[in-house]
Amino acid sequence: MTVSKKKLRGWAKGYLFILPSIIGFSVFVAYPLLSSIYYALTEWSGYDKPRFVGFDNFKYMFTEDPAFWPSVRATLYFVIMSVPLSLILGLLLAMLLNKSLPGIKWFRTIYYLPTVVPSIATLTLWLFIYQPQYGLANSLLRLLGLPEGTWLTSETTALPSIVLIGLWQVGSGVIIFLSGLQSVPQELYEAAEVDGAVRWRMALHITIPMITPILFLQLILGIIGAFQAFNQVQVLTGGGPNFSTSLLNFKIYNDAFNGRMFGYSIAEVWVLFVIIMIFTALTYRYSNRFVYYESDNSK
Amino acid sequence: MVMQTEVRTTTRKPRRKFSILDTIRFIILTIGAIAMLFPLLWMVTIALKGNNDVFKIPPEWFPRELHWSNFVTGTREINFWQTFGNSMFIAVVCTIGQIASSVLVGYGLARLSFPGRKLWFSLFVGSLMLPGFVGMIPLFNLYTSLGWYDSWLPIIVPAFFGNATFSFLYVQYLKTISVSFDEAAKIDGASDFYILMKVLVPMTTPVIMTMVIFSFQGAWNQYLEPLIYIIDPSKWTLSLAMASYKGTYATAWNLFMAADLIYILPMLLIFFFGQKFFMQGLGSVNSASLK
């Protein structure tokens, strides 16, 4: 089969346009991904040449590293706490913000505002908020006559305190759900109203099913994102107290750039990667059946 | 599904002015809004307080006198403005790179036909699901061997090689624009690049604005990459500077908060002037990815 010269030129043109992403994908995605399979099996400080050690890194990780299992525990705890909470809060707020009300535009703006604050500005602000003596959190509790909180200083409250900061920035989720809610066809509600359905039943049987695709997508992205949390730990706690906030991504960074164990941290990257894949696959498997896709939407 | 799901106010039916349910809704929303605003307002009051007023128990919720000079003193001590300039430069260059490359790639994927188009498209989109830190260490090694360590290059250069989210968004947006516009221009002898720049880009300014805003925000906020690559404090970005100076300022909260507020300011300005694009953007990211 011969391809005409004109056609070939057309193909070349196509590749020319997408060339940036082909290079980007090869260099910044494929190369590191593939090479890290090998690096995970080496001992490597980053200064010297990687030395092949088989599965020693994994053996050390699972049996000896005192920080590994606490980090896994902290990471899972963080994901299981933060992802559902922000989904539910985001959805509830979106439903409250959906229908008209005096000042509704202001409300939407205010709820979105915290997400505009850069991550590091947010975290440093909350570091001061959580400061035990002069911080906002304890000042407020004292004002209300409540006992002071331990916030970032205790093993039991440090991680929930970090989750709370995430909830303060629930706004982008709210807007995403809001745009989903507004794309639910009005006829459905009108039809339900004719049938005499009450509001909460409409929410349960129309609104929620219609936005399940968005809910599902946000759930998956939320899980992937939460597993990669890093800034919070680096800025707020440094992993403590007693590894209670030592999220895996932070441990990976720390082992690589402070411990100079490149090979070992790449092995940890792969473990985290596998955990994320398992979580995503399970979520996919168990929640996809609840997802409602409009049949005429499959273009 | 409509691409730009604009956040509009739904009016379902002409209803009584204000039902009990609406009142409850209003009250809950007000309480929530106060909770959202409170940390930021607290930040502003601290930034305006005198040195010793910060550490008073019980705290003064409103500063007795306003110390506007904190914004000057707070930014003088940490080389703030140079760092601010660094961040601004990096964010602008990254934004230009990401938008330019993503628009080109988006056009290629949406409008040109060539073998392997679908494969590349799914590879690019699939890479979005890949956690970012997977490549961190091999890339660190790569950049170091290129001599890019302690420079901005590891942050800036990748921006010019396409951003999967933005390309994807642009592809989805282009699909909503009829090819008859391209064909008309083609009959007139226009090249693909000309069609893209003169016909399609002007028609897609809303989505490009959205991309610009999110690209700038991403670059302005990024922390991990600067943390790994930039050592010399004169090359630091604001995110690095603010994170490291939080210790230096342990005794001068007012100065820290004042500096932190200026760090937030560009994002606030963009938000207030480009609010429409933020809202549209989140909506369209949403509906585009569900197609």
Image (cartoon, coloured by chain):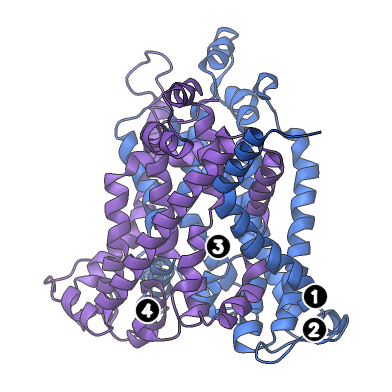
Q: Are marks 3 and 1 in contact (CB under 8 Å)?
A: no
**Spatial distance from mark 4 to mark 3, Cα to Cα?**
24 Å
Left or right: where does residue A268 sit relative to residue B50?
Answer: right
Decide which of A15, A207 is in the foreground and name it: A15
Please name the residue shown 45% across and 59% down the image.
Answer: B218
Give the label on residue B182, or none.
none
Q: Residue furthest top?
A: A194
Q: Nearer the viewer, mark 3 or mark 1?
A: 1
Callout 1 crowding tier (Cα within 10 Å): few <14, some 14–19, many ≥20 = some
In space, the residues marked 2 and 4 are separated at their CA atoms by 34 Å
- The residue mark sitting in front, 1 or 4, is 1
Res. A77 image quadrant = bottom right
Q: Is residue B227 above or below residue B124?
A: below
**Chain A on-screen colour:** blue
Which of marks 2 and 3 precedes in the sequence?
2
Residue lying furthest left in this view? B65
x then y, percent, for residue B255: 25, 78
Disc 3 element: helix
Q: Are marks 1 and 2 in contact (CB under 8 Å)?
A: yes
Secondary structure of the residue carrying numbered label 2: strand
3D distance between C-alphas at marks 1 and 2 = 7 Å
Above or below — where is B185 with respect to B191? above
Q: Which residue is mark 2?
A: A42
Q: Which residue is mark 3?
A: A163
